[in-house]
Amino acid sequence: MKRILVTGGAGFLGSHLCERLLARGHDVLCVDNFFTGSKQNVAHLIADPRFELMRHDITFPLYVEVDEIYNLACPASPIHYQYDPVQTTKTSVHGAINVLGLAKRTGAKILQASPSEVYGDPDLHPQPEHYWGRVNPVGVRSCYDEGKRCAETLFFDYWRQHGVRIKVARIFNTYGPRMHPSDGRVVSNFIVQALLGDDITIYGEGTQTRSFCYVDDLIEAMIRLMATKDEFTGPINIGNPVEFTIHDLASQVLALTGSDSRLVFKPLPMDDPRQRQPDIALARQVLRWEPETQLAEGLERTIEHFRDRLLTQQIAELAALARSGPRQTAQPQAPTELVPDAPAQPLAQTA
Ligand code: NAD
Ligand code: UDP
Ligand code: UDP
């Protein structure tokens, strides 16, 4: 049994990681400022005496005693990380300094959740770990891409200079239950749009590609990475190498939901990478790991999750409507929280 800190533990990936670590018998301290995560994501873990939830912003120092640290705290979708870009860079850079300082003091092993965005809009395909990337340092995505690149630099300097035991994972597009429904990411957008019968918004012509990894596979790889020998630092790509065009994804979502939503084409966002696929040869070799979940199977589980959320919210809204006065005949509206492309708002700090 270890004492494990998960920063960003109330987010999409963090909540699955906390769940899995508890199931393995560890004590888990989940630290989050609830900017994009929510208490709801970890509500089912609160009753476990080995789970502790702490509201804290990692740009401030944190003094706790732990054996391992997974550093996931950082808004991950463009609309959220671009909402307050300076804070995004601070979270990546100041946050990394604080958790690395904590690892240095306690001797804890520390894993960084780095994204495939460190490769930018790559001119090498698929991307192996030795590829240095093609990143715009002054664009709207730079706060995230460069912030995460600087965090990697800090991890490697704390390793070289202070002997901190580090692991750097480079995570490619991951999806699954508890993705934020209005964070603008393609899988959640398409599923919610299809379930609501709204237009499916394809940016550009939909010929750009991504490789989608189901969350359970990703978490397994992260835990295996933490368990590698101290000599192994990474960086190591984690993701699913099976590549799909965004148009393919839209077709699969339509087929699996049975929706008759229309496909509509919108302008491609700035600096949107045309192609992305991980080279996972190193993960296969070192972690003896391979993603197991096929896209259709993972999408079905994710669709199920959003269907339930939608239903729960519609019931709550109908109940509120019923309580608020004389019966209305109007159709219930789609719950605003579940409508994609919502204006870029930070989520309630009191989530
Ligand atoms: P998420 O937004 O759901 O989770 C991030 C969590 O960090 C949220 O709970 C948020 O409230 C918290 N947070 C943000 N700033 C914080 C701060 N200053 N202090 C404390 N908590 C803070 O995103 P996610 O998809 O779960 O991503 C988790 C991590 O994995 C991120 O670091 C992201 O860069 C990385 N990652 C995710 C993906 C993906 O496809 N989901 C891909 C590559 C990398
Ligand atoms: N830090 C922390 N928790 C700890 C130890 C350090 O949050 O348990 C923070 C501390 O605030 C410091 C940062 O981590 O600013 C970096 O620590 P380090 O020891 O590397 O640097 P120094 O304290 O010398 O600036
Ligand atoms: N995308 C899209 N429609 C949407 C949301 C996203 O076509 O409603 C596209 C987006 O332009 C990008 C791809 O889907 O090419 C993946 O976007 P996402 O934000 O999920 O991830 P990232 O760009 O970080 O890989």
Image (cartoon, helix red, strand yellow):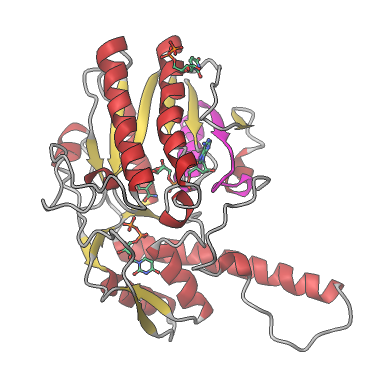
Q: Quadrant of ligand 1?
A: top left
- On screen, residue 319 versus residue 251, left or right, reads right
Compared with 57, 245 (above or below) is: below
Q: Residue at 55% x, 70% y: name it.
A: 339
Q: Which residue sits furthest bottom?
A: 329
Q: Position of residue 308 (x, y in %)?
A: 57, 65
- On screen, residue 156 versus residue 80, left or right, reads left
Q: Quadrant of residue 144?
A: top left
Q: Residue at 86% x, 73% y: name it.
A: 324
Q: Which residue sits furthest left?
A: 124
Residue 227 seen in this snapshot: no
Q: Residue at 64% x, 45% y: name it.
A: 349
Q: Position of residue 298 (x, y in %)?
A: 37, 60
The reply to whether the magenta stretch includes residue 34 is yes
Q: Which residue sits furthest right?
A: 326
Q: Position of residue 19 (x, y in %)?
A: 50, 39
User: Which residue range is magenta in the image?
Assistant: 12-40
Q: Position of residue 102 (x, y in %)?
A: 46, 17
Nearer to me, 179 or 206: 206
The reply to whether the magenta stretch includes residue 15 is yes
Q: Quadrant of residue 260?
A: bottom left
Q: Quadrant of residue 32?
A: top right
Residue 295 seen in this snapshot: yes
Q: Residue at 23% x, 67% y: name it.
A: 208
Nearer to me, 69 or 140: 140
Nearer to me, 65 or 76: 76
- On screen, residue 315 versus residue 341, left or right, reads right
Q: Which residue sits furthest front?
A: 138
Tally of marks: 0
